[in-house]
Image (tube, helix red, strand yellow):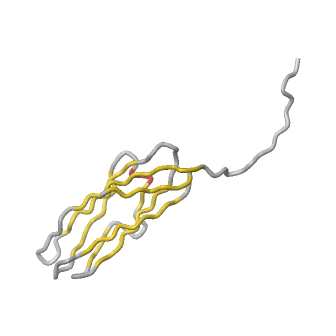
Amino acid sequence: KTIEFTGALHATVVQQVRLKNPSSKTLMYNAILVGRDADDFSLPKGNTVTIAPKRQTNINVEFTSRFLHPAEAVLLLISKRVGGINGATLTFSLKSEVKHIEPADILKCKSPCYEL
């Protein structure tokens, strides 16, 4: 699955990933961001995710654009053994697109166009 982050240059965009636990045992995952632009993505609630039995949880993934080029990374969720049960390893592709640029400031300057 691909999660897309679209926004302005230097803006922070948050997307949620919903994880469901259909089993009767607690699942625990270690979340890792890997890839060329992994430093531009973050997990504000930490890298450990616990999902209670028969429940669901959301993971917030934040992206702050620093450049105009599209950023790419992968979110890996690797299961930790809890009570003898392992969940499947999950992967999500993270992609960004800068749609517009907001000026940080506007400066007016006067200068002669030509001098001898």
Q: Residue at 55% of width from left, 57% of height from top? A: 11
Q: Residue at 13% of width from left, 74% of height from top? A: 85
Please state the horizontal and vertical placement of residue 78, each as a whole percent of the image: 23, 63
Q: Is residue 85 left or right of residue 93?
A: left
Which picture quadrant has residue 25?
A: bottom left
| Residue nearest the observer in this picture, 54 or 49 | 54
| Residue nearest the observer in this picture, 106 or 79 | 106
Which quarter of the rendering shows the N terminus?
A: bottom left
Q: Residue at 17% of width from left, 69% of height from top? A: 87
In the displayed structure, 16 sits above or below 72; it is below
Please state the horizontal and vertical placement of residue 45, each as a whole percent of the image: 40, 70
For this orientation, the residue located farthest to the left is 84
In the displayed structure, 103 sits above or below 86; it is above
In the displayed structure, 19 sits above or below 24; it is above
For this orientation, the residue located farthest to the top is 116
Please state the horizontal and vertical placement of residue 115, each as a whole percent of the image: 87, 21
Please state the horizontal and vertical placement of residue 100, each as a whole percent of the image: 58, 50
In the displayed structure, 68 sits above or below 54; it is above
For this orientation, the residue located farthest to the right is 116
